[in-house]
Amino acid sequence: MSAALPQRLWLVGCGNMAGAMLERWLASGTIAADAVDVVNRHDRTLPGNVRQARTLPDGPPPDLVMLGMKPQQLDDVAATHGPAISKAPLLVSLLAGVEEATLAARFPGPAIVRATPNLPVALGKGVVALRAEAAPQSAKDAVTALMTPLGLVEWTGDPAIFAALATLGGCGPAFLFRFIDAMAAAGEALGMGADQAARLALATVDGAAAMAAASDASPATLADRVASPGGTTRQGLNVLDRDDALVKLLTETLQAAERRGREMAAEAKR
């Protein structure tokens, strides 16, 4: 497997996440639309007029196959497309909770990399956690080159850390969206109109995130810079900081998501 950027891709399943990745690859010029074949159970609206069908194309295998369907469809995909997928040199799996050994048993042959991206990959602002147990470095380099246009790429060899990365990065946007909604609802409680509160909450989070990303200071330091002693912001922070309420809530949230990931991994082994 060359370390060069993969040129031909098969996407088996192209729902919200795989579709977001594809959108960014096409927009950034990383992959050409005519180099992608998608297999979907039902036609979806895909960017760039990418080809889609119910079966994989005949002919030589692509440089990379990516599994983007639901984990529960793994056995059906292996039964239908397994021989063709197994001829590819590299397999990237987005299937939450499905371990490498489970994939290798169904698709012997390709180097296997597990990936957990999040939806902001569509904007090139995503996070992609990657792990591979047996893939050669050339395969890892090829996957890194493919994923880099999507945002921050993080490799780990530790399965526990991969699960944590997948939980924080993969699930994190949903939790942040909830936070934005909660800020807007709190704004409404202060008397703002719903639309105005929603606009203000979104713009505030957007600006604060951009500032944190551009700053050498930690978010905790930035919070202290906003909060004057005895001022309004400090009074609000006192509520969030009381008994580590916010940290405890988010820890419980991430633990629940990670626990479900372990359950899904056990289910995939059956």
Image (spheres, helix red, strand yellow):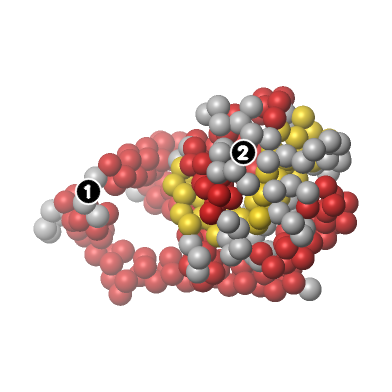
- The answer to whether residue 118 shows anywhere in this view is no
Q: Are marks 1 and 2 in contact (CB under 8 Å)?
A: no
Q: Which mark is residue 267?
A: none
In the image, residue 126 above or below residue 167: above
Q: Secondary structure at mark 2?
A: loop
Q: Position of residue 205 (x, y in %)?
A: 36, 44
Q: Which residue is mark 1?
A: 216
Residue 108 visible in this rendered orientation of the protein: yes
The quarter of the picture where residue 201 lies is top left
- Position of 53 with respect to 158 (left or right) is right
Could you give the CA–CA distance between mark 1 and mark 2, rounded to whole angstroms?
35 Å
- Mark 2: give few (<14), some (14-19) or many (20+) Cα within 10 Å: many
**Image location of residue 7, percent across then percent down:** 64, 34
At x 63%, y 47%, the residue is 1
- Mark 2 highlights which residue? 6
Against 241, residue 88 (above or below) is above
Which of the 4 image quadrants contains residue 130? Answer: bottom right
Callout 1: SS: loop
Q: Residue at x 46, y 54 (%)?
A: 154
Residue occupying the point 24% across, 58% down: 220
The residue at the far front in this view is 2
Query: Where is residue 62 shown, x and y percent of the image?
Result: 73, 39
Badge 1: how crowded within 10 Å, few (<14), some, or many (20+)? few
Label 2 is placed on what type of residue? Pro
Identify the residue shown where x is 65% and y is 43%. Answer: 18
